[in-house]
């Protein structure tokens, strides 16, 4: 099986920075795209940023220039560096990964359990 474990959430003041990481482990043959989503209280889960294995990235408009997604393919880990944080960035942040398991040909989308980011003074 495959597990995704996020870390790095917490409380930060407006204008501050926080880094998240998410490591995929298990019977992994290859990890294709990886991404970060978030869900604020009372709202639907939304895309924050994605990155494919070649490094091409995609961002939600409101985080462009403030957030940076990156990955370490050797460690099957994706990162999200968040700068200039705003109260509206408060949410549970989830990572996901398209994983091809050993012995299989098709990819399955896996999700982490989420980590809470609170931006407040």
Image (cartoon, helix red, strand yellow):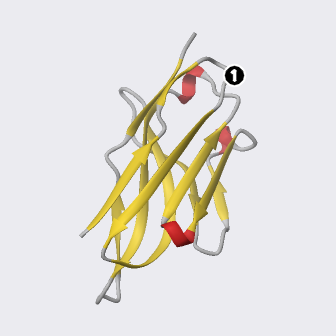
Task: List x then y, in percent, for residue 48.
Answer: 55, 47
In this rendering, the answer to whether 38 lies above or below 49 is above
Q: Residue at x 64, y 27 (%)?
A: 85
The residue carrying mark 1 is 15
Element at badge 1? loop
Q: Residue at x 50, y 60 (%)?
A: 77
Q: Position of residue 52 (x, y in %)?
A: 58, 69
Q: Residue 14's x, y, as percent?
A: 64, 18
**Rendered view: 88 above or below 106:** above
- Of 58 and 24, nearer the camera is 24
**Res 102 quadrant in image:** bottom left
Q: Residues within 10 Å of mark 1 (few under 14, many from 20)?
A: some
The number of callouts visible is: 1
Viewport quadrant of the C terminus: top right
Q: Position of residue 106 (x, y in %)?
A: 35, 84
**Residue most toward the front?**
75
As drawn, is 10 to the left or to the right of 109?
Answer: right
Which quarter of the figure is the N terminus placed in? bottom left
| Residue at the image position 36 percent from the left and 65 percent from the top | 25
Residue at position x 33%, y 62% from top? 110
Q: Quadrant of residue 50?
A: bottom right
Identify which residue, 110 or 77, lies in the foreground. Answer: 77
In the image, residue 36 above or below residue 29 = above
| Left or right: residue 108 compared with residue 64 | left
């Amino acid at each position: 099986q495959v597990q995704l474990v996020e870390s790095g959430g917490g409380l930060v003041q407006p204008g501050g920075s926080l880094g998240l990481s998410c490591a995929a482990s298990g019977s992994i043959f290859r990890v294709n795209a990886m991404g970060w989503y978030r869900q604020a209280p009372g709202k639907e889960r939304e895309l924050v940023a994605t990155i494919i294995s070649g490094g091409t990235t995609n961002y939600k408009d409101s985080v462009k220039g403030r957030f940076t997604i990156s990955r370490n393919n050797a460690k099957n880990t994706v990162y999200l560096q968040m700068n200039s944080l705003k109260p509206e960035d408060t949410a549970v942040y989830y990572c996901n990964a398209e994983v091809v398991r050993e012995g299989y040909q098709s990819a399955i989308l896996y999700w982490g359990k989420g980590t809470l980011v609170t931006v407040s003074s």
